[in-house]
Amino acid sequence: MNRGLLIVVSAPSGCGKGTLLAEILKDKDYYYSVSATTRSPREGEVDGVNYHFATREEFEDLIKSDGMLEYAQYCGNYYGTPKKEVEKKLSEGKNVILEIEVQGAMQVKEIAPEGVFVFILPPSVSELKKRLLKRGTEEISVIEKRVSEAVGEIKYAEKYDYVIVNDDLSKAVDDFKTVISAEKMRTKNSKEIIDEVLKNA
Ligand code: 5GP
């Protein structure tokens, strides 16, 4: 069996990344890596499903025991990808999605350059602001801060392999699937197919 692809997805908040990934994850070939974090659960979030919620001490223990593939501090909290499950799912042939911010993504790029790095963009910064305002969950000052953070993050987009603009959701889903199909056809990911064709030749 071919190993699955390691897919790293980053996007500033308000890019509709959650909705896009929910569509992709309907396909059982994909596995969503559940991160660990020290931030408190938001309403409706479930431990082990959205995140593994941990204390700072637990998180730092995992770092010390080399249990993290990558980690970063974001808005005063730790976020990280536990290594074990990612490795297990990749070896089972699943495409593993890491939904992480840019600092973590750059660490993964160092240790796993064979990964597929995808950046989700909003159609424009003004549209992003409009979406955050419409969501109505934050005060204007917080929205301003998120928008300026988004601008900083978008500057990293060119370090990724692919950029997908999430303007129309179904187009963005198609674009994402196209990227993954193309990646699977790369010769480096097709060794077993070549061997299979040559079997008994
Ligand atoms: P939130 O608190 O809104 O759930 O996430 C904040 C940011 O942390 C988002 O950009 C999200 O992609 C990122 N994030 C979530 N899990 C991880 C992780 O395991 N590692 C890193 N580096 N970032 C993460």
Image (cartoon, rainbow, N blue to C red):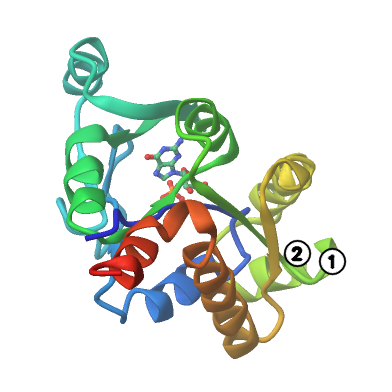
Q: Residues within 10 Å of mark 1 (few under 14, many from 20)?
A: few
Q: CA distance from mark 2 to mark 1?
A: 5 Å
Left or right: 35, with 65 as reference point: right
Amino acid on which the number 1 mark rests in the picture: Ser
The correct choice, above or below, for 142 with respect to 170 in the image is above
Assign a secondary structure to mark 2. helix
Amino acid on which the number 2 mark rests in the picture: Lys
Residue at position x 24%, y 76% in the image:
28
Task: Identify the residue under disc 2.
Answer: 129
The correct choice, above or below, for 30 with respect to 141 in the image is below
Residue at position x 65%, y 66% in the image:
132
Q: How many marks?
A: 2
- Tell me residue 101's x, y (percent): 53, 42
Is disc 2 in contact with disc 1, using a CB cutoff of under 8 Å?
yes
Task: Identify the residue under disc 1.
Answer: 126
Residue at position x 32%, y 60% in the image:
192
- Tell me residue 71's x, y (percent): 40, 27
Nearer the observer, 168 or 195: 195
Quadrant of the image where one finds ligand 1: top left
Assign a secondary structure to mark 1. helix
The correct choice, above or below, for 84 with respect to 99 in the image is above
